[in-house]
Image (tube, rainbow, N blue to C red):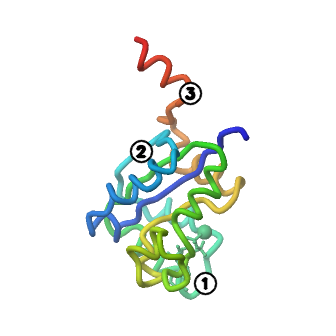
């Protein structure tokens, strides 16, 4: 199937715990390509847009505090079925329900500190990639591989 793109965030708890490499490696080992990557403390305004669907829920304010607390790694991952493959690599939202071998099961204990975000649908992925990388900076991977190697 055609390649998809999805938005991944390595959240502040994972960055603080020194897990950027470990988490990134799991996605790379599955064969997903990193089409964009940036290290940044997410602003409150952007966090509120990103998590707009959760506004009004009891955990919403804490969620925005969490994601804006310190730097995250923002990535666009690309590949066949990238959205679903990213979600299964991450594991269930609640670490206690995540399957061993997934990121959230192997490194997480609490739902409020679950290490990683991945878009949950094609619509979310398009919206979230646009929100974080709307200014550009996404590599055309298929083209880049040809030109980087040959030039
Ligand atoms: P997802 O990240 O697996 O897509 P969502 O339901 O979209 O899960 O929730 C977004 C994020 O909000 C979760 O990853 C988690 O960080 C946080 N969250 C969700 N439910 C709770 C909760 O009950 N308590 C605290 N944080 C929560
Ligand atoms: Mg979600």
Mark closer to the observer (2, 3)? 3
* Label 1 environment density (alpha carbons within 10 Å; few <14, some 14–19, many ≥20): few
> Does ligand 1 reach within 8 Å of label 1's beta carbon?
yes
67, 26: nearer the viewer: 26
Residue 16 location (% of width, % of height): 27, 67
* Residue found at the very far bottom of the displayed protein: 58
Separation of marks 1 and 3 at Cα, in angstroms = 41 Å
Residue 131 falls left or right of residue 36: right
Q: Secondary structure at mark 2?
A: strand
**Is 122 situated above or below 56?**
above
At 58% from the left and 64% from the top, the residue drawn is 88
Determine whether 64 is above or below 25 in the image. below
Residue 135 location, x and y as percent?
A: 51, 38
Ligand 1: image quarter = bottom right
Q: What's the distance in space between the residues labelled 2 and 3, CA to CA?
A: 17 Å
The residue carrying mark 2 has its beta carbon less than 8 Å from ligand 1: no
Mark 1 or mark 2: name the one nearer the start of the chain.
2
Going from N to C along the chain, the mark reached first, 2 or 3, is 2
Give the residue displayed 59% in from the left and 63% down from the top. 87
Which residue, given by chain and number where applicable, does mark 1 sit on?
A: 57
Q: Is residue 21 above or below residue 77?
A: below
**Quarter of the rendering containing residue 84:** bottom right
What quarter of the picture does the C terminus occupy? top left
Judging by the rendered image, the residue that carries numbered circle 2 is 37
* Of callouts 1 and 3, the N-terminal one: 1
User: Which type of secondary structure does the marked residue at label 3 adopt?
Assistant: helix
Front position among marks 1 and 2:
2
Task: Point out which mark residue 142 bears.
Answer: 3
């Amino acid at each position: 199937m055609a390649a998809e793109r999805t938005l991944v965030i390595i959240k502040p708890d994972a960055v603080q715990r020194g897990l950027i490499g470990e988490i990134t490696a799991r996605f790379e080992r599955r064969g997903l390509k990193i089409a964009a990557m940036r290290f940044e403390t997410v602003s409150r305004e952007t966090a509120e847009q990103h998590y707009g669907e959760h506004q009004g829920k009891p955990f919403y304010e804490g969620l925005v505090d969490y994601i804006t607390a310190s730097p995250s790694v923002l990535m666009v991952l690309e590949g066949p079925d990238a959205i679903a493959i990213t979600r299964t690599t991450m594991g269930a939202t609640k670490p206690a329900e995540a399957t061993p071998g997934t990121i959230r099961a192997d490194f997480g204990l609490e739902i409020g500190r679950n290490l990683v975000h991945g878009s949950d649908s094609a619509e979310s992925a398009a919206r979230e990639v646009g929100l974080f990388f709307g200014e550009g900076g996404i590599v055309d991977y298929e083209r880049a591989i040809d030109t980087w190697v040959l030039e």
